[in-house]
Amino acid sequence: MRVLLVSANREQIPDPIFPLGLAYVAAAVRNAGHRVEVADLCFGHHPLRDLREQVAVFQPDIIGLSLRNVDNAAYPLTVDYLSQHREVVDNLHRVSQAPVVLGGSGFSILPDAYMEALSGDWGIPGEGERVFVELLDALQNDLDPSAISGLIAASHRVSNHSNQPVVPRRRPLWAQDLRPARDLFDYTRYVRRGGMGNMQTKRGCVFKCSYCTYPLLEGNRFRAREAGDVVDELQELQHEYGPHPVFFVDSILNFPRGHIEAICEEILSRNLQVSWSCYATPVKLDRHQAGLMARAGCESIELGSDAIDDLQLKQLGKSFDAETVERANRYCMEAGMKVCQTLIFGAPGETESSVRATCRALRRMNPTAVVAMTGVRLYPGTPLTQSLIAQGHVKVKDIGLLPAFYIDPAVTDFLPGFLQQQARAAGNWVLPGLAPPLLPVSQKILRRLGVSGPLWRLLRKPWIHYFNRSKFRRPNTSWGVPNPKHKVFQHNVSISRKP
Ligand code: B12
Ligand code: SF4
């Protein structure tokens, strides 16, 4: 069959991100003997016009549409991508009768809502490699695809008022004999513009942090690749596309213990010179692990601490305490890595005292950068959302495509002004919800100057530090003028602002 795979993501903040998930699906479809083309809407001045032209020439039998982001998860500067996604579907329908199959992480968080909003013909929540190929085989052989497990049919959105979710299918050996089909995309452009490539070494997460979607998206068990296979791919990448930094997209790369250690030993034994970055947990991050990672090329690490206050960590369902965060931060910095602390302020249970405790700890720890979200984005199915619904603070119908956030009433008035003062004093903070991000044009210039890797690493450079501080010169003491197209839950009331 003639299969067109479209990556809808045009977001350039914090960087343009190579559509790794779609590249995996493309590889599976190609391996199954189908003819594949990809349309990547990330770059170019007229992506929709180019898309229509490509469809007219290629005449696909079926179109797979990858929806990575629902929104930017930032409050109050929320960016919502639904209208962009709708535009893509409308343009596809203008020039083609081919059925549209929806997939991707954004889609998988809210599959029924997306099926409805975008009138999808089929939808595949979770991993697409196998189910998409099964769908193609069924259509090619005139079989009824509705029996395929893990597939949502258009009729489902009519019949599914029982709200029975379709269970995603997950393979233990998801990467066996499969390499992402990067050759179908302009991978080097992502490396040039985004400053790094990307790879995945395992799927799933065993932790149960209250707000997090990752276990829902990837499953609550780790499914890891062999270290040798991971390093083979890393080596192939460097060989095919030239030396470039890589971001490992795993939910947390350094857990369970032994996984990253084996990968690092393999990198070192092959004497492979490559710099990389990752997300990590402070759990079991000791001196040995930090040192080994640094020696094997880990230049920067994003520690998903979320808070540095024991009570608040407990509220968030984290599996470590504040002391563990401080220790992990120290070990990474001593090993020579750049460290970014990622935090969430305003989750249930937050108080002025817990916010102040986290900020005091940050001053002691002095990480390279801090990225802090203000308010928690509520997603369906997370422990936090379920408990807020059970307590009557939030209604099921409010958790949908329209971004919804929770901010604890105890800190609603205090948070915006206080955090902006902290950000101004520190100079190395990013508050995606409260201050506009680096402009794409500045990002382009930095990349042209040869800056690679995550840009937060620059926040210690005096001129960037100065520029970043100036964003918080006149801190708002209120939430400012929020994006009207979202909901925020404060004081146990859902405030829905109409556009
Ligand atoms: C790593 C990561 C990042 C890194 C990326 C680094 C890099 N160079 O790659 C960084 C930190 C830069 C980042 C940034 C952002 N991210 Co992010 N990120 C992730 C993460 C952890 C992994 C993404 C990934 O690569 N997965 C691996 C690939 C193989 O999986 P996949 O893309 O899901 O693809 C599979 C399936 O979805 C499916 N599939 C995909 N496409 C298709 C198409 C079809 C037709 C089918 C059938 C199936 C299918 O099959 C694929 C293979 O199995 C996810 C969370 C998660 N666990 O998924 C969040 C996630 C994607 N990010 C998210 C967000 C919001 C963002 C930001 C907007 C945050 C911000 N405010 O800056 C930015 C946007 C950046 C951009 N330009 O788009 C959200 C998106 C959902 C939402 N809330 O909107 C997620 C899901 C996290 C969350 N909060 O739940 N991110
Ligand atoms: S926040 Fe990190 S450790 Fe916690 S469940 Fe999500 S991915 Fe796992």
Image (cartoon, rainbow, N blue to C red):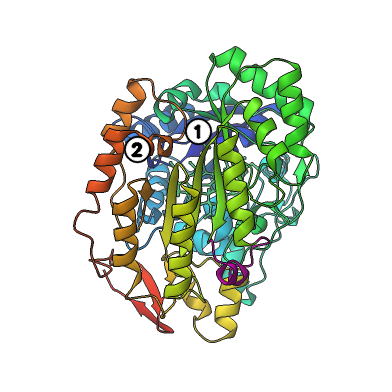
Q: Position of residue 226 (x, y in %)?
A: 80, 32
Eye-nearest disc, 2 or 1: 1
Residue drawn 34% across and 33% down?
A: 461
Q: Amino acid at mark 1?
A: Phe
User: Who is closer to the viewer here, 406 or 123?
Assistant: 406
Q: Quadrant of residue 345?
A: bottom left
| Residue at disc 1, CB closer than 8 Å to ligand 1 | yes
- Which one is earlier in the sequence, the residue at label 2 or at label 1? 1
Left or right side of 14 for 251: right
Q: Position of residue 46 (x, y in %)?
A: 30, 33
The residue to which callout 2 is attached is: 48
Q: Secondary structure at mark 2?
A: helix
Q: Is residue 381 magenta?
A: no
Q: Residues within 10 Å of mark 2 (few under 14, many from 20)?
A: some
Q: Position of residue 157 (x, y in %)?
A: 57, 66
Q: Which mark is residue 18?
A: 1
Q: Amino acid at mark 2?
A: Leu
Residue drawn 33% across and 27% down?
A: 446
Q: Which quarter of the rendered picture does the C terminus lie within?
A: bottom left
- Magenta region: which residues? 308-320
User: Who is closer to the viewer here, 463 or 231?
Assistant: 463
Q: Position of residue 152 (x, y in %)?
A: 64, 57
Left or right side of 293 for 269: right
* Count of numbered labels shown in the rendering: 2
